[in-house]
Structures are given as C-alpha cells and as structure tokens.
Image (cartoon, rainbow, N blue to C red):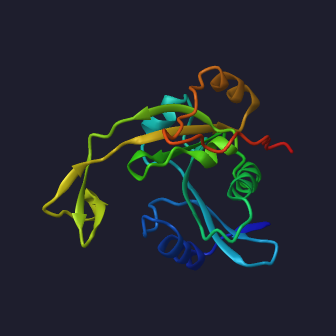
Amino acid sequence: MRLEKASYKAVKFACMNYHYAKRIPASVNVSYSVFNDDNEFCGVIMYGYPATPSLNKQFNLKHGELLELRRVALNSKQKITSQALGISMRLIKKDCPTVKMLISYSDKGQDHYGTIYQATNWIFIEESDSSGYEYYVNGKWMHSRHGKGEIKRKLAGKRKYIYPLEKKLMIEYKLKQKPYPKKLSGVVESNADFNLED
C-alpha cells in the first residue's frame, strides 16, 4: 500500500463517489491519495485544522497543534483500511511537525461506532448529543447549512476520539480513556497492535 499527497481532483472524486456525505468537507489542509499493491487508486484520507479555537483550548493546545481527521473516503480496493489510516498518521508526523494530537468523530446518526479508530488504538473521549437539526431534502437527510426541507429531525450526535502524537500526551489521555462503544448486535473488530513508531 502506498500513500502520496492528493490533488484536488482526487479529493473531489473520492468524496463524491466513495463517501456517504457526497461532499468535500470544509477546511481540508492535508490530503493523501491511497493506492493498493496493484497501484490502483483507492480514495483519499483528509485532515484539517479545527474551525473553532475552543477545541484547541479543550486540550490545552495552540493553533496548529491539533488536526482533525475529516474524511476517510475509500472504495474498499485497499486491503486494510486501518493500515491506510496508520500510514497517513505517520505521514502527518513527518509533514506537519507542529501537530501534537489528532481528533476525529464517528457519526451516531449513521450508526458508526469508530471501529477504524478502535483498530488503530485511538482514545475514546466522549459521546455527545447534538443541539442541531437535519432536514429531508431531495430524498436524503442533510445538515441545515446545506438546505432546509419541510421534514426535520434532531441530529444524533458524535463519538469523539483522539490520538496524541506526543508520548507525554498519550500517557496523560490514556488515563482518561473511556471504554470503546460497542454495537448492541455484536462486538466491533478487536484492537489491532498499532504503533506510530513501528
């Protein structure tokens, strides 16, 4: 498997064809194209700096020290998704040396539990409810910023995961880790042995 910096064309194609949201997320700063062992394009992994300064403050970090995983838009031609994510995390350490921590969310509304984060040893911090709403527009549910329809429902909220890139922060937040959320109908994939230093 191979990753390289992604072009805007690759980002747009992967977001529109391989991700359920069918849109490019705002404020993407670093993107990687993923290629399998046969050199086939499998999609992209995208990161961006948080839009709200309060998120940095929550972890006592400065601007530029926290990076959010915005999209994993892959077509399943890669062998192991967690391996692709792991490679991208190593590249972030190299390409963005000021970044001390990664953060990402799994969408409760899509019944996502963060299996890929659990497989790569991210730290589960919290589960939150949302005060926002989504609307049914043109046959699908959309956030209010993308349009409003007659039918609306409350957003389901998110599950928050972090991955400290500094050893000191990893030790600190491992002590605060909550048990991984599990699907009621079964158990999510087990934690893989994963280390950015490997």
* Between 83 and 115, the one nearer to me in the picture: 115
The residue shown at (78%, 78%) is: 39
Give the left or right position of residue 87, taking residue 8 as reference: right
The C terminus, quarter of image: top right
Compare residues 52 and 10 and report the one nearer the observer.
Answer: 10
Q: Position of residue 159 (x, y in %)?
A: 47, 39
Give the residue at the far right of this rendering: 198
Q: Residue at x 77, y 52 (%)?
A: 94
5 displayed left or right of 23: right
Judged left or right of residue 55, residue 173 is right
Q: How many marks?
A: 0
Question: Image quarter for residue 164?
Answer: top right
Q: Position of residue 166 (x, y in %)?
A: 73, 34
Residue 10: x percent and y percent? 60, 76
Q: Position of residue 25 (x, y in %)?
A: 46, 62
The N terminus, quarter of image:
bottom right
Residue nearest the observer in this picture, 137 or 169: 137
List the single residue furthest toward the front.
185
Location of residue 191 (image quadrant):
top right
Task: Name the outermost residue toward the top.
Answer: 175
The residue shown at (30%, 47%) is: 155
Q: Is residue 165 above or below residue 9?
A: above
